[in-house]
Image: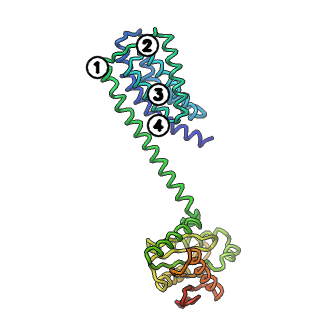
């Protein structure tokens, strides 16, 4: 309910500015057209109320409503009704009438699409009917030069203002969409790419290597005895370890490297355009830095990493095969004592290229 009210207030604020501006320009257009008809004083009073007072009253009405969104729809229908009323009052003078109807229609389409356009049109027709009852039915075909000039600001400036408001709204929605997309692809605890997003990047890297005949390596990183860390020091300590590793990855990888959280205590890195030996050196440096890290909350806690590496091979049928080789190397690193970097390649399967122990 609170979220709906917030959205309704946002709509009310946007419409308040456009209503103040539009009805001020509309007042100029209608008053010049009505001046030639010499209307009674109450008509001038109603015109001034509609053009100068109603925008502020409508905003306060919507703001005080429990559902501002519905209140604004009601206000827009009142706008449409009054637009139709003034068309009949101007005795259907072509240019002022067409200008009034088209600006109202533009507003209704921008707010609610075709459905609300129909509702607004019905309100306009009802307003015309009331106007025909109040004023003697008549039709004035000619439009004077003064009436033409009075309509020009509404014709030129209001569409510009409405377009600017719609542009800003579209930009805001676009930014929110990008933010939501980023959140959907990010692991909330570590800030790295989540499993699905990293796999997407892996497929792209595989296709790039295949297309451009470039080398690359991928690394799978496992935190040794992570379950024991959670059982001994608690899950809060485990989360701190995960965040520390993600922080270390961000600090030590290149801008072109792509790190992610594969799941649980397992992390993954794409190292484009890097030979396997150099990738192993980078991962060994990461392992050493992580092994000496201290934890203020638990000074006795020391954590090590097991890392499996695999280089891109043109014989790989797909990225999954490449990932399997890195997984095999990680399995070997854990099976041979943990706290080490193992590389997997066609000519040197499951070999520790560096002395990590």
In whole angstroms, how far apart are the C-alphas of marks 4 and 3? 13 Å
Q: Quadrant of residue 49?
A: top left
Seen at 39% across and 17% down, the residue is: 93
**Label 1, on which residue?**
145
Image mark for residue 14: 4
Q: Residue 67: x percent and y percent?
A: 60, 34
Image mark for residue 56: 3
Of the two numbered discs 4 and 3 on the same chain, state the one appearing first in sequence.
4
Of the two numbered discs 2 and 4 on the same chain, state the one appearing first in sequence.
4
In-front residue for pair 309/236: 309
Query: What is the residue that sits farthest to the left in this orientation?
Result: 145
Q: Quadrant of residue 267?
A: bottom right
Image mark for residue 4: none
Of the two numbered discs 1 and 4 on the same chain, state the one appearing first in sequence.
4
In whole angstroms, how far apart are the C-alphas of marks 2 and 4? 29 Å
Identify the image quadrant of the N terminus.
top right
Q: For numbered disc 3, what is the local secondary structure?
A: helix
Q: By what rule are the colours in the image chosen?
A: rainbow
**Label 2, on which residue?**
43
Q: For numbered disc 1, what is the local secondary structure?
A: helix
The reply to whether residue 298 is in sight is: yes
Q: Tell me if 48 is positioned left or right of 340 in this view.
A: left
Of the two numbered discs 3 and 1 on the same chain, state the one appearing first in sequence.
3
In whole angstroms, how far apart are the C-alphas of marks 1 and 2? 23 Å
Q: For numbered disc 2, what is the local secondary structure?
A: helix
| Circle 1 Cα neighbour tier, 10 Å, few/some/many (<14 / 14–19 / ≥20) | few
Look at the picture and state if 92 lies above or below 59. above
Q: Residue 315: x percent and y percent?
A: 53, 81
Task: Select label 3 or label 1 by which is in front.
Answer: 1
| Circle 4 Cα neighbour tier, 10 Å, few/some/many (<14 / 14–19 / ≥20) | some
Task: Select label 3 or label 2 by which is in front.
Answer: 2
| Circle 2 Cα neighbour tier, 10 Å, few/some/many (<14 / 14–19 / ≥20) | some
């Amino acid at each position: 309910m609170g979220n709906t009210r917030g959205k309704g207030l946002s709509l009310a604020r946007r419409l308040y500015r456009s209503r103040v501006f539009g009805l001020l320009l509309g007042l100029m257009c209608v008053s010049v057209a009505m001046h030639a008809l010499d209307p009674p004083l109450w008509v001038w009073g109603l015109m001034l109320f509609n053009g100068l007072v109603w925008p502020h009253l409508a905003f306060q009405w919507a703001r005080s409503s429990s559902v501002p969104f519905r209140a604004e729809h009601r206000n827009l229908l009142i706008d449409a009704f009054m637009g139709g009323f003034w068309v009949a009052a101007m005795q259907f003078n072509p240019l002022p009438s067409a200008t009034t109807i088209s600006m109202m229609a533009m507003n209704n389409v921008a707010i609610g699409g075709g459905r609300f356009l129909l509702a607004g049109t019905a309100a306009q027709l009802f307003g015309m009917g009331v106007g025909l009852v109040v004023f003697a039915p008549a039709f004035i075909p000619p439009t004077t030069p003064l009436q033409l000039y009075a309509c020009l600001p509404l014709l030129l400036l209001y569409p510009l203002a409405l377009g600017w408001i719609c542009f800003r709204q579209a930009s805001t929605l676009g930014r929110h969409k990008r933010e939501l997309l980023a959140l959907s692809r990010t692991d909330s605890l570590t800030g790295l790419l989540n499993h699905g997003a990293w796999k997407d990047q892996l497929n792209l890297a595989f296709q790039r290597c295949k297309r451009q005949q470039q080398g690359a390596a991928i690394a799978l990183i496992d935190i040794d005895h992570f379950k024991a860390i959670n059982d001994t020091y608690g899950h809060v300590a485990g989360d701190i370890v995960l965040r520390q590793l993600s922080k270390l990855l961000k600090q030590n990888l290149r801008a072109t490297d792509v790190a992610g959280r594969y799941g649980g205590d397992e992390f993954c890195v794409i190292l484009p355009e890097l030979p396997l030996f150099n990738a192993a050196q980078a991962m060994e440096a990461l392992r050493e830095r992580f092994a000496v890290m201290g934890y203020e909350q638990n000074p006795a806690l020391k954590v090590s990493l097991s890392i499996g590496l695999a280089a891109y091979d043109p014989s790989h049928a797909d990225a999954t095969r490449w990932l399997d080789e890195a997984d095999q190397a990680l399995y070997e690193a854990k099976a041979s004592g943990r706290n080490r970097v193992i590389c997997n390649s066609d000519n040197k399967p499951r070999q520790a290229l560096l002395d990590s122990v």
